[in-house]
Amino acid sequence: MPPRAKGTPVGRRVVLGMLGVGAVGIVIGRQATETVSSVVASTAPGLSAVIPATGGFRIYTVTNNYPGVDPDVYRLGVNGNVTNPLSLSLSDIAELPQTQMTKDFQCVTGWRVDDVPWTGVLLSDVLAAAGADLESSALRFYSFDGVYTESLTMEQALRPDVLVASQMWGKPVTREHGGPIRLYVAPMYGYKSLKWMSGIEVVDAVVPGYWEERGYDIDAWVGASNGRNDEPIA
């Protein structure tokens, strides 16, 4: 989750709580930290931001828990300006051409995880399977948490480093990391890589997503947006 937009105060009790939980995490180690992270996220969204999770990630949620879905009933919808609307099960996604890439994950709050191995289907391949209108201006992405949304232009979506990700580090994307399917937009800050993805809609114009509505850049290139100068992801 990006930092709060300018002018939005953070209560002193919340800040102290975050620091306290973070200190506990440092003392009690990785396994207990992950347990505490799950508990905190389910009771106070955002507080888990101070707790390291698997592989150095911080876990964020815009609701008050980690949403979950039965893998057997999960479907990724692809609709809008397409000739072949899709409702993809996890098996369907696994049967599409698979792409692997190892790239960093950069959060707009400043932390970075280097060399994360990702596996999934290029977003461009999903759009091709749906017969997407490539003259359309943009895409909207929806999360099954019912709140989180994101967007990309069609040009951005067709890049070879934008993935409908099903695996991280050679294992299925976990619930905490946005599984079973999440978006991974390598060259942009992490808030563009929507978690718990349930839908892709091809639309005529860019619609600002959850974080853009709260003041963050729509075109969130690492090192060239949001007032940050982080090293771009190659």
Image: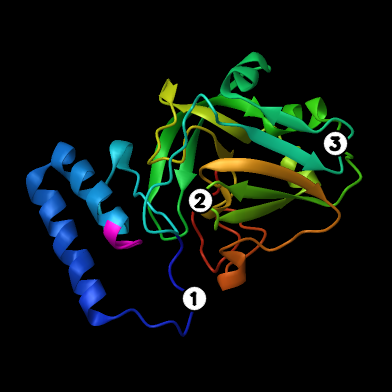
Mark 3 or mark 2, which is nearer to you? 2
In this picture, residue 139 sits left or right of residue 75:
right
What is the spatial separation of the Cα atoms under label 3 and label 2, in whole angstroms?
A: 25 Å
Chosen colour scheme: rainbow
Up the image or down, 217 lies above or below 123; here it is below
- Secondary structure of the residue carrying tag 2 is loop
Q: Position of residue 108 (x, y in %)?
A: 47, 59
- As for residue 120 lying within the magenta part, the answer is no
Q: Mark 3 = which residue?
A: 132
Q: Residues within 10 Å of mark 3 (few under 14, many from 20)?
A: many
Q: Quadrant of the C terminus?
A: top right
**Do the residues under discs 3 and 2 have CB atoms within 8 angstroms?**
no
Q: Amino acid at mark 3?
A: Ala
23 left or right of 198 in image: left
Could you tell me which secondary element the residue under label 3 belongs to?
A: loop
Instruction: Label the magenta part by its dominant secondary structure.
Output: loop
Residue occupying the far left of the picture: 27
Residue at which label 2 appears: 145
Residue range highlighted in magenta: 43-47
The extreme top residue here reads 95
